[in-house]
Image (cartoon, rainbow, N blue to C red):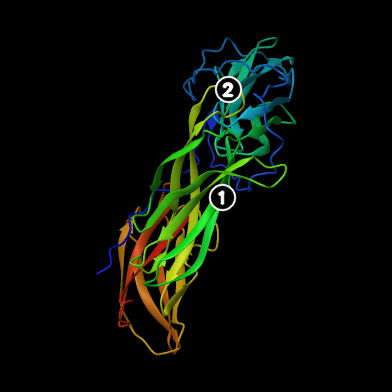
Amino acid sequence: MQRSRAIVPVLLAAITTLTALPACEDKTAPAAVTPVPTAPTAPAAPTSPVAPTATNAAATPATPAAGAPRLTFDSLTHDFGTVLDSEKYSTSFRFTNTGTGTLIIYTVKTSCGCTVATLRKTEFLPGEGSTIDVVFDPKGKTGTQTKNLTVVSNTQPASLTKLSIKAVVQPMVQYTLFLEFGVIALGESHTRSVEVFYYDPNLEITDLFSTNPAVSARVVRPGRSNPVIGQPPYRATIEVTVAPDTPWGVLFQTRVKFTARGEPARGVDPVAVPYTLFVNGRVFGDLRVDPVLLTSKVKLGRGEPVRMSATLSRASGAPFSVHDVTITESTMSGLTAHIEATSAGIYEIVVESVTPAVAGAVNGAVMVTTNVPGEDRLVLHFSMYVR
């Protein structure tokens, strides 16, 4: 009997007053590598990281001033220059209320979870000012990065002020972030590999770990020379293997984690930097499901009806039966699941309910029972987001 794999919680963006951490949208492949690097330098020395303050801490303002506030920044952009992915970088955007009324900053939103903005107080009389302190974490990034910040205030008519930071991230290792297996035959073992490129001849790749017990990884042939001009001179291979007893279904949120230990740049002290390789694939026998993840096709508000469905069919065209469908895991109560026969040999697996009164992600899994030998218990995952 196959066991449902544990659902890995989805990290959600939470926009709170003065500090926002939305999930980072960057999913770009590593950019081309420049010649052997030296320790990078930024065009402007960043300030030291600022200890975060309570994001919704109430300031004690003086008596509000009548008139129109005006938010004026010394600069709207900051360029960190070339940075390493093994460190965090910080800067501050200084501003002043150059208007005649009390300035209120309601929130500072960031476009990426890799960027954190902190503001010490929220209300400023005419002539008063402060700084918005920003910390950028380039881990997992490579090449040119531009991150935006939106300041929401009571200035009129332009209540939104755009800030931005920029950096060229020089990672210690270069590799393809996503490893795609495609469709894997049920009951068979499959292996694919990813090349990892680096500059330090003594660099070691250690601590390999897979979040999926049916997927393993190992390092082979480290320290080989790379014949491609313009790329790092050394390379190693990470081999990823899907075991023959991997259950039917999607390699749901499978990640291979590893640590690179070595010099991030010439003349820089050795460090240990964690990295993640995302593994995608679908383990199917004769039964196929489309889509592989049940989800809502529309954006959902709170208290709205929701229907998530997927079609289950047999590749050979042979008849089969679906006996039952049961929700086995869910982060939301009140969900129901049922089967609808759409045509000969095709079934629709349906999960539906009313969205909760609280915004956030809803994730779970259903167990589908069939009469197909070796594919009699199937696990399907579902996911949606409530605004």
**Disc 1, SS:** strand
Q: Amino acid at mark 1?
A: Glu
Asked whether 103 or 173 is in front, the reply is 173
Q: Amino acid at mark 2?
A: Val
Asked if residue 101 lies left or right of residue 5, the reply is right
Asked if residue 150 lies left or right of residue 362, the reply is right
According to the image, label 2 marks what residue?
Answer: 268
According to the image, label 1 marks what residue?
Answer: 195
Q: Which residue is found at the position 67% from the left and 38% from the top?
A: 143
Q: Residues within 10 Å of mark 2 (few under 14, many from 20)?
A: few
Whichever of callouts 1 and 2 sits on the residue coming sooner in the sequence is 1
Q: Quadrant of residue 171?
A: top right
**Disc 2, SS:** loop
Asked if residue 371 lies left or right of residue 295, the reply is left
Residue 254 at x, y percent in the picture: 43, 54
Asked whether 341 or 283 is in front, the reply is 283
